Amino acid sequence: MNCNRLINLRNLLFFLVICLTACSSESSLYADNQSHPQIIKKIESFYQVWKKTPYRYGGNNSKGIDCSGLTKTFYHQKLGKVLPRVTKEQIIEGKAVKQLSAGDLVFFKSGRGTTGLHVGIYYKNGLFLHASTKNGVQYSNLNDHYWRNHYLSARRIVD
């Protein structure tokens, strides 16, 4: 199979995942009935180390980190899982979920094309951890107008 055909198949798969997961119900976002206390503690301890780390596109250290770098680092350091480095590849990992649990990846459509994706780690009570372009590593609320309107999907990597 030639390279162009492989790239086109990958883009088609990505498009299908986006279309299928975008249909998830907004009201299901805030259900915490499956949250895991041990993962919540891991998110909290991870946040203590990374809070206020500035956003840097392509970054993956304490001098600066981007959203997919943060999720990749969390999963590797705290859960022993390896995630792809970029958001458009992370969005096809694991399984799609409608009711969020601590540690689920949450995805947002934040711009145009496939590069306009943002990812964070669901924490609890509607909060998620992410690398904000304005404020660095922080918690944000899924109920906030911006995040609610840009929510795309969630993926569970660990059960």
Image: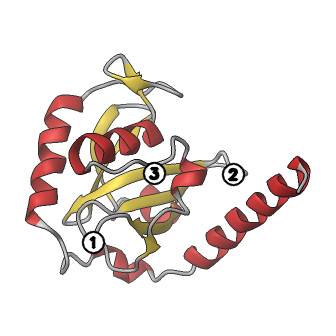
Q: Quadrant of residue 23?
A: bottom right
**Residue in view at x 51 percent, y 54 percent:** 90
The kind of residue on which mark 2 rests is Thr
Q: 10 Å neighbourhood of mark 3: few (<14), some, or many (≥20)?
A: many
Residues at marks 3 and 2, CA–CA distance in whole angstroms: 13 Å
- The residue singled out by tag 1 in the image is 159
Residue carrying label 2: 114
> Which of these two is toward me, 147 or 33?
33
Q: Residues within 10 Å of mark 2 (few under 14, many from 20)?
A: some
The residue tagged 3 is 119
The residue lying at 53 percent from left, 59 percent from top is 91
- Residue 96 locus on image (x, y percent): 46, 75
CB-based contact (under 8 Å), mark 2 and mark 1: no
Element assignment for label 1: loop
Under circle 3, the secondary element is strand
Identify whether 57 is placed above or below 23.
above
In the picture, which quadrant includes the C terminus? Answer: bottom left
> Label 2's element?
loop
Q: Position of residue 40 (x, y in %)?
A: 14, 57
Q: Closer to the observer: label 1 or label 3?
A: 1
